[in-house]
Amino acid sequence: MNDPVLLFTSLSSKVALFQSVQKQAKFFSPKARVIGADSNPSCKGRVKIDHFCQTPKTKGWNTEDLLTFCKKYKISHIIPSRDGELVLWARNKEALKKIGIDVMVSSEQALKRCQDKYEFSKSWPQECLLQPIPTFTEPEEISDQELVVKERRGSGSKKIGLELSLAQAKEWGASLHEPIFQPYLEGPELSAETWINREGKCHGMLLRWRKVVVHGESHETEVFKDRILEEKIKSSLELIDGLYGHCLVQLIIPANSKPMLVEINPRLGGATPLALYAGIKSISWFLMESYGMGDEIPMSPTIKYGSKLFKKNGKVRIENPFTSRQNNGED
């Protein structure tokens, strides 16, 4: 078996996440190498990692250039880390597979279903135990209450309008490219993270409260246990054909109501270092499956409940309640 060479794309300032990926890759194979890549040669993460390479911007990368690039750096596995590039890798997944390169990315169809918030809501099976937040293209379709306005596609935290009246929602929507409207819900927010194999089955399910959220990313989050909710999320994800690799789900629990799906992100997230630390070994499992060791991946791995992640001034700290040891990194 050749030692894996992983390409971690869109590095930016994701140093803590990069380090978590690297740690799991080296656990699988001590001689594994992870290369951080970004289209910006001056990105913040470059000076904090051992191996870096510059890539073209996503829109400027055709299939032949991509294959040539991967051959040049002897890449064996690719870990995309940004929403905007996932479709590119999905479209080239088979071409890369033919030259021996595995990509941890879902199918293009699954990605588009998750990235389009309107279609995600409208096409969701009504019989599912978990339901997404009702989503509309016109604000008048929502009953008399406060509204949320956001872009139909792309990151939900960008250009989002919260607790708006009907008139305010219309004004806010006019400033967006393709606005969608949702009822404003108050309640605790949580994320769920898992790894999905090639057959679409979830391995492990980690829940964490989103205690402090900044620009859509958890800056304080804690792992907790709820077996019933874990099973509901697992069964929901397994309904979506083509999901693969690490997957992150955001939910909210409105007052006196059931948990509701906010969005599904089929990729690593900003607080994913906590999930990788606490039991969801996505990178190790991705490598194991690619080398024909899928039968050895546990369906129900041990989870370190109570583990916490804190992010402040760009630095990430993970606390394990069972020991005095802490895992420190930077992001």
Image (cartoon, rainbow, N blue to C red):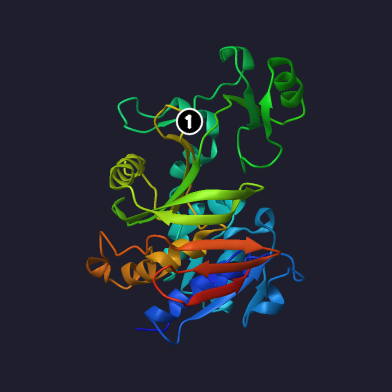
Query: Where 219 falls versus 278 (above or below)?
Result: above
Image quarter of residue 50: bottom right
Q: Is residue 255 left or right of residue 142?
A: left
The residue lying toward the viewer, choosing from 61 and 275, is 275
Residue 228 image point, x, y percent:
28, 42
Q: How many marks?
A: 1
Q: Is residue 245 left or right of residue 138?
A: left
The residue lying toward the viewer, choosing from 212 and 279, is 212
Residue 203 image point, x, y percent:
31, 57
Residues packed near mark 1 inside 10 Å, few (<14), some (14 to 19) or many (20 plus): some
Q: Which element carries disc 1, helix, strand or loop?
A: loop
Query: Where 241 falls versus 298 (above or below)?
Result: above
Can residue 6 be spotted in the picture? no
Mark 1 lies on residue? 254
Q: Is residue 177 left or right of residue 303?
A: right
The residue lying toward the viewer, choosing from 171 and 287, is 171
Query: Where 207 falls versus 284 (above or below)?
Result: above
Residue 47 image point, x, y percent:
71, 78
Residue 270 image point, x, y percent:
57, 58
Residue visible at 32% across and 44% down in the picture: 238
Q: Is residue 78 left or right of residue 60?
A: left
Image quarter of residue 278: bottom left
Can residue 33 be spotted in the picture? yes
Residue visible at 35% across and 67% down in the picture: 285
